[in-house]
Protein backbone atom coordinates (compact mmCIF):
# COMPACT_ATOMS: atom_id res chain seq x y z
CA UNK A 1 0.00 0.00 0.00
CA UNK A 2 1.38 3.40 -0.93
CA UNK A 3 5.11 3.95 -0.71
CA UNK A 4 5.98 1.77 2.27
CA UNK A 5 8.55 -0.97 1.76
CA UNK A 6 7.56 -4.58 2.39
CA UNK A 7 9.29 -4.50 5.80
CA UNK A 8 7.61 -1.21 6.76
CA UNK A 9 4.25 -2.64 5.69
CA UNK A 10 4.89 -5.77 7.75
CA UNK A 11 5.82 -3.70 10.81
CA UNK A 12 2.73 -1.55 10.50
CA UNK A 13 0.26 -4.37 9.84
CA UNK A 14 1.84 -6.74 12.39
CA UNK A 15 1.78 -3.93 14.96
CA UNK A 16 -1.85 -3.16 14.23
CA UNK A 17 -2.71 -6.80 14.90
CA UNK A 18 -0.79 -6.40 18.16
CA UNK A 19 -0.08 -3.32 20.26
CA UNK A 20 0.29 -0.64 17.56
CA UNK A 21 -1.92 2.41 17.14
CA UNK A 22 -2.84 4.71 14.28
CA UNK A 23 -4.50 7.98 15.25
CA UNK A 24 -5.36 11.45 14.12
CA UNK A 25 -3.81 13.91 16.57
CA UNK A 26 -5.68 17.11 17.44
CA UNK A 27 -8.15 16.51 14.60
CA UNK A 28 -5.41 16.71 11.99
CA UNK A 29 -6.22 15.65 8.46
CA UNK A 30 -3.64 12.84 8.42
CA UNK A 31 -2.91 10.02 10.84
CA UNK A 32 0.31 9.02 12.57
CA UNK A 33 1.65 5.62 13.63
CA UNK A 34 2.50 5.15 17.31
CA UNK A 35 4.74 2.41 18.73
CA UNK A 36 4.66 1.91 22.49
CA UNK A 37 6.21 -1.04 24.34
CA UNK A 38 7.77 -1.75 27.71
CA UNK A 39 11.29 -0.35 28.13
CA UNK A 40 12.40 -3.96 28.58
CA UNK A 41 11.96 -4.27 24.80
CA UNK A 42 13.92 -1.15 23.92
CA UNK A 43 15.78 -3.03 21.15
CA UNK A 44 12.48 -3.88 19.49
CA UNK A 45 11.25 -0.27 19.55
CA UNK A 46 14.61 0.95 18.24
CA UNK A 47 14.42 -1.58 15.40
CA UNK A 48 10.93 -0.41 14.42
CA UNK A 49 12.07 3.20 14.56
CA UNK A 50 15.13 2.50 12.41
CA UNK A 51 12.97 0.78 9.81
CA UNK A 52 10.56 3.74 9.82
CA UNK A 53 13.23 6.44 10.14
CA UNK A 54 12.23 8.34 6.99
CA UNK A 55 8.86 9.02 8.63
CA UNK A 56 10.15 9.78 12.14
CA UNK A 57 11.44 13.14 13.44
CA UNK A 58 12.04 12.41 17.13
CA UNK A 59 13.90 9.35 18.45
CA UNK A 60 12.13 6.98 20.87
CA UNK A 61 11.79 8.21 24.44
CA UNK A 62 11.01 6.53 27.76
CA UNK A 63 7.98 7.49 29.80
CA UNK A 64 6.88 6.37 33.25
CA UNK A 65 3.56 4.58 33.16
CA UNK A 66 1.25 3.20 35.81
CA UNK A 67 2.96 1.68 38.82
CA UNK A 68 6.52 0.59 38.07
CA UNK A 69 6.03 0.29 34.32
CA UNK A 70 8.32 2.33 32.09
CA UNK A 71 7.21 2.64 28.47
CA UNK A 72 9.41 3.32 25.47
CA UNK A 73 7.74 4.89 22.45
CA UNK A 74 7.89 6.95 19.29
CA UNK A 75 5.47 8.33 16.74
CA UNK A 76 5.79 9.02 13.05
CA UNK A 77 4.81 12.22 11.33
CA UNK A 78 1.16 12.64 10.35
CA UNK A 79 1.14 11.69 6.68
CA UNK A 80 -1.30 10.54 3.96
CA UNK A 81 0.32 7.08 3.83
CA UNK A 82 -0.67 6.44 7.45
CA UNK A 83 -4.12 7.88 6.82
CA UNK A 84 -4.62 5.17 4.19
CA UNK A 85 -3.84 2.50 6.80
CA UNK A 86 -5.98 4.30 9.38
CA UNK A 87 -8.98 4.13 7.05
CA UNK A 88 -8.21 0.46 6.42
CA UNK A 89 -7.93 -0.54 10.09
CA UNK A 90 -10.39 1.79 11.84
CA UNK A 91 -14.14 2.25 11.70
CA UNK A 92 -15.84 4.85 13.88
CA UNK A 93 -12.57 5.28 15.78
CA UNK A 94 -12.29 1.57 16.68
CA UNK A 95 -9.54 -0.74 15.49
CA UNK A 96 -10.92 -3.62 13.44
CA UNK A 97 -9.68 -6.43 11.19
CA UNK A 98 -9.92 -5.57 7.47
CA UNK A 99 -11.71 -8.25 5.46
CA UNK A 100 -9.05 -8.02 2.73
CA UNK A 101 -6.14 -8.43 5.14
CA UNK A 102 -3.37 -10.67 3.80
CA UNK A 103 -0.75 -12.24 6.06
CA UNK A 104 2.84 -13.18 5.23
CA UNK A 105 5.69 -14.58 7.39
CA UNK A 106 7.14 -11.17 8.31
CA UNK A 107 3.74 -9.75 9.29
CA UNK A 108 3.12 -12.84 11.40
CA UNK A 109 6.54 -12.48 13.04
CA UNK A 110 5.88 -8.85 14.03
CA UNK A 111 2.42 -9.79 15.29
CA UNK A 112 3.95 -12.59 17.37
CA UNK A 113 6.70 -10.34 18.77
CA UNK A 114 4.10 -7.69 19.60
CA UNK A 115 1.42 -9.80 21.18
CA UNK A 116 2.34 -13.48 21.15
CA UNK A 117 3.41 -15.90 23.84
CA UNK A 118 4.09 -19.59 24.32
CA UNK A 119 2.91 -22.08 26.88
CA UNK A 120 4.59 -25.46 26.78
CA UNK A 121 4.41 -26.51 23.12
CA UNK A 122 1.63 -24.14 21.99
CA UNK A 123 1.66 -20.53 20.85
CA UNK A 124 -0.91 -17.89 21.77
CA UNK A 125 -1.83 -14.67 19.98
CA UNK A 126 -3.48 -12.26 22.40
CA UNK A 127 -6.40 -11.14 20.28
CA UNK A 128 -8.68 -10.27 23.21
CA UNK A 129 -9.12 -6.71 21.93
CA UNK A 130 -10.97 -7.96 18.85
CA UNK A 131 -14.56 -9.19 18.59
CA UNK A 132 -15.47 -12.88 18.23
CA UNK A 133 -16.25 -12.32 14.55
CA UNK A 134 -12.90 -10.61 13.98
CA UNK A 135 -11.03 -13.40 15.77
CA UNK A 136 -12.70 -15.92 13.48
CA UNK A 137 -11.56 -13.83 10.50
CA UNK A 138 -8.01 -13.99 11.86
CA UNK A 139 -8.31 -17.76 12.23
CA UNK A 140 -9.40 -18.01 8.61
CA UNK A 141 -6.56 -15.74 7.44
CA UNK A 142 -3.96 -17.74 9.38
CA UNK A 143 -5.09 -20.99 7.80
CA UNK A 144 -5.66 -19.64 4.29
CA UNK A 145 -2.55 -17.44 3.99
CA UNK A 146 -0.12 -19.26 6.28
CA UNK A 147 -1.39 -22.83 6.59
CA UNK A 148 -1.58 -22.40 10.37
CA UNK A 149 -4.53 -23.86 12.28
CA UNK A 150 -5.75 -22.27 15.48
CA UNK A 151 -8.55 -22.54 18.03
CA UNK A 152 -10.25 -20.01 20.28
CA UNK A 153 -8.94 -20.28 23.82
CA UNK A 154 -10.65 -18.72 26.83
CA UNK A 155 -8.40 -16.46 28.90
CA UNK A 156 -10.52 -15.53 31.92
CA UNK A 157 -13.59 -13.84 30.37
CA UNK A 158 -11.94 -13.13 27.00
CA UNK A 159 -10.95 -15.24 24.01
CA UNK A 160 -7.61 -15.42 22.24
CA UNK A 161 -6.08 -17.57 19.50
CA UNK A 162 -4.25 -20.76 20.41
CA UNK A 163 -1.93 -22.30 17.83
CA UNK A 164 -1.57 -26.03 18.37
CA UNK A 165 1.69 -27.92 18.82
CA UNK A 166 1.90 -29.06 15.19
CA UNK A 167 1.08 -25.64 13.74
CA UNK A 168 3.47 -24.02 16.24
CA UNK A 169 6.30 -26.13 14.81
CA UNK A 170 5.48 -24.97 11.31
CA UNK A 171 5.02 -21.37 12.41
CA UNK A 172 8.49 -21.44 13.95
CA UNK A 173 9.97 -22.51 10.63
CA UNK A 174 8.45 -19.62 8.70
CA UNK A 175 8.93 -16.77 11.21
CA UNK A 176 12.23 -17.71 12.88
CA UNK A 177 14.46 -15.60 10.63
CA UNK A 178 12.41 -12.46 11.38
CA UNK A 179 12.37 -12.83 15.18
CA UNK A 180 14.72 -10.41 16.94
CA UNK A 181 17.17 -11.77 19.57
CA UNK A 182 15.21 -10.18 22.43
CA UNK A 183 12.21 -12.36 21.52
CA UNK A 184 13.95 -15.67 20.84
CA UNK A 185 12.64 -16.89 24.18
CA UNK A 186 9.16 -17.03 22.63
CA UNK A 187 10.18 -19.71 20.14
CA UNK A 188 9.39 -23.25 21.14
CA UNK A 189 11.28 -25.17 18.47
CA UNK A 190 14.52 -24.94 16.57
CA UNK A 191 14.34 -24.01 12.84
CA UNK A 192 15.10 -27.66 12.07
CA UNK A 193 13.06 -29.88 14.32
CA UNK A 194 11.30 -33.23 14.40
CA UNK A 195 7.74 -34.39 14.05
CA UNK A 196 6.13 -36.77 16.57
CA UNK A 197 7.47 -39.77 14.59
CA UNK A 198 11.01 -38.50 14.86
CA UNK A 199 11.45 -37.34 11.25
CA UNK A 200 13.59 -34.27 10.74
CA UNK A 201 11.64 -31.39 9.22
CA UNK A 202 12.86 -28.51 7.12
CA UNK A 203 11.08 -25.80 5.14
CA UNK A 204 10.48 -26.73 1.50
CA UNK A 205 10.41 -24.40 -1.50
CA UNK A 206 6.62 -24.08 -1.20
CA UNK A 207 6.91 -23.06 2.49
CA UNK A 208 5.66 -26.40 3.79
CA UNK A 209 7.51 -28.60 6.31
CA UNK A 210 9.26 -31.40 4.45
CA UNK A 211 10.73 -34.53 6.07
CA UNK A 212 14.42 -35.00 5.29
CA UNK A 213 15.12 -38.59 4.27
CA UNK A 214 18.47 -40.23 3.77
CA UNK A 215 18.11 -39.97 -0.01
CA UNK A 216 17.31 -36.23 0.14
CA UNK A 217 20.21 -35.27 2.41
CA UNK A 218 23.57 -34.05 1.18
CA UNK A 219 26.36 -36.07 2.70
CA UNK A 220 29.86 -34.62 3.20
Image (spheres, rainbow, N blue to C red):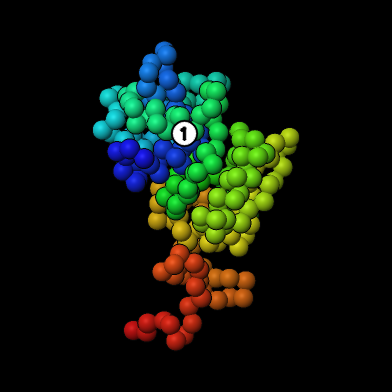
Name the one closer to the observer, 156 or 151: 151
Does 149 sit left or right of 189 as displayed? right
At horizontal 49% and vertical 73% (from top left) the residue drawn is 210
Residue 181 on image: x %, y %:
41, 49
Q: Quadrant of the N terminus?
A: top left
Please tell me whether residue 15 is drawn above or below residue 150 in the rendered image: above
Q: Which picture quadrant has residue 12?
A: top left
Residue 48 on image: x %, y %:
36, 37
In the rendered image, is residue 211 in sight? yes
Residue 61 on image: x %, y %:
36, 24
Q: Which residue is mark 1?
A: 88
Residue 196 on image: x %, y %:
62, 71
Asked which secondary structure carries label 1, the reply is: helix
At horizontal 46% and vertical 85% (from top left) the residue drawn is 214
- Residue at the extreme front: 100
Does 90 sit left or right of 155 as displayed? left
At horizontal 26% and vertical 33% (from top left) the residue drawn is 54
Q: Quadrant of the C terminus?
A: bottom left
In the rendered image, is residue 43 in sight? no
Please tell me whether residue 142 is drawn above or below residue 8 in the rendered image: below
At horizontal 39% and vertical 24% (from top left) the residue drawn is 31
Does 50 sit left or right of 143 as displayed? left
Few, some or many C-alpha atoms within 10 Å of disc 1 (few <14, some 14-19, many ≥20)?
some
Name the one closer to the observer, 132 or 220: 132
How many marks do you count on the picture? Answer: 1
- Residue at the extreme top: 26
Amino acid sequence: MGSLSSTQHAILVGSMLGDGTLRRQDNRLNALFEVNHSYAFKDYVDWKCEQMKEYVITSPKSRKGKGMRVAYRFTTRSLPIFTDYYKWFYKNGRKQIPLNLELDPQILAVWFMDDGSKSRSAYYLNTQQFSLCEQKILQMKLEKDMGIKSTLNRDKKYLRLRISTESAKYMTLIVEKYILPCFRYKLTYDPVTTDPKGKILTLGQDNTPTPITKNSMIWF
